[in-house]
Image (cartoon, rainbow, N blue to C red):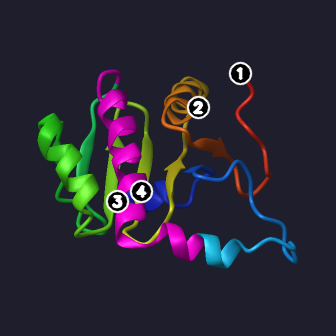
Amino acid sequence: MTEALLNKPYWVIDFLPEQVPEGSSGQYFAVEEYYLRPERIAAIHARFAEILLKLNCYYDLRVCEAGTEAFESNPAPEALFSRVCEMKEDLWILLPGENALLTLNRDYTHMTVYHPDKTLLRRLDRLAASAGLFLWQPETGAYWKK
């Protein structure tokens, strides 16, 4: 099931509001390297954890190490927060009732959302904004239209 979802359209929740254009005069790689430092990436992961905790108020969440499909259903809030913040493994978060999947990689500054419907996108947009993050679609550059 999850493998099929990984081939569906996706959105990202990111610290940047859009993809940096190729050839940009800015210092994207230096800034990304800064945010990948342990203390900075931990702060970004904490924001992702807050989003997931709030999302779990609306949806059944199933969490596993990426690629294993050994899902834990609705982990305790403290356990979910710790698992996301510590990021000892890449994670898959399945929303089975929505047929959607979120992925978190240890070395990425974004969270990916596969196959979200409009209601999920609306909620994620609001949750991302409350965490100082942005929701956008890399393939099209689209933003969620409220």
Give the residues in magenta: 32-58
Residue 34 in the image, given as x and y percentages of width and height: 53, 72
Is 64 one of the magenta-colored residues?
no
* Helix, strand or loop under label 1: loop
Q: Quadrant of the N terminus?
A: bottom left
Is 53 one of the magenta-colored residues?
yes
**Disc 1 from disc 4: Cα separation:** 23 Å
User: On residue 146, which mark appears?
Assistant: 1
Residue bearing mark 3: 42
**Disc 4 from disc 3: Cα separation:** 16 Å
Which amino acid is tagged 3? Ala
Residue 91 in the image, given as x and y percentages of width and height: 31, 60
Which is more N-terminal, label 4 or label 1? 4
Mark 4 against mark 3, which lies toward the viewer?
3
Q: Quadrant of the C terminus?
A: top right
* Helix, strand or loop under label 4: strand
Which amino acid is tagged 1? Lys
Residue at figure coordinates x 23%, y 67% from the top left: 68
Which is more N-terminal, label 3 or label 2? 3
Q: Are marks 1 and 2 in contact (CB under 8 Å)?
A: yes
Which is more N-terminal, label 2 or label 1? 2
User: On residue 125, which mark appears?
Assistant: 2
User: On residue 103, which mark appears?
Assistant: 4
**Disc 1 from disc 3: Cα separation:** 29 Å
Residue 63 in the image, given as x and y percentages of width and height: 24, 50
Which is more N-terminal, label 3 or label 1? 3
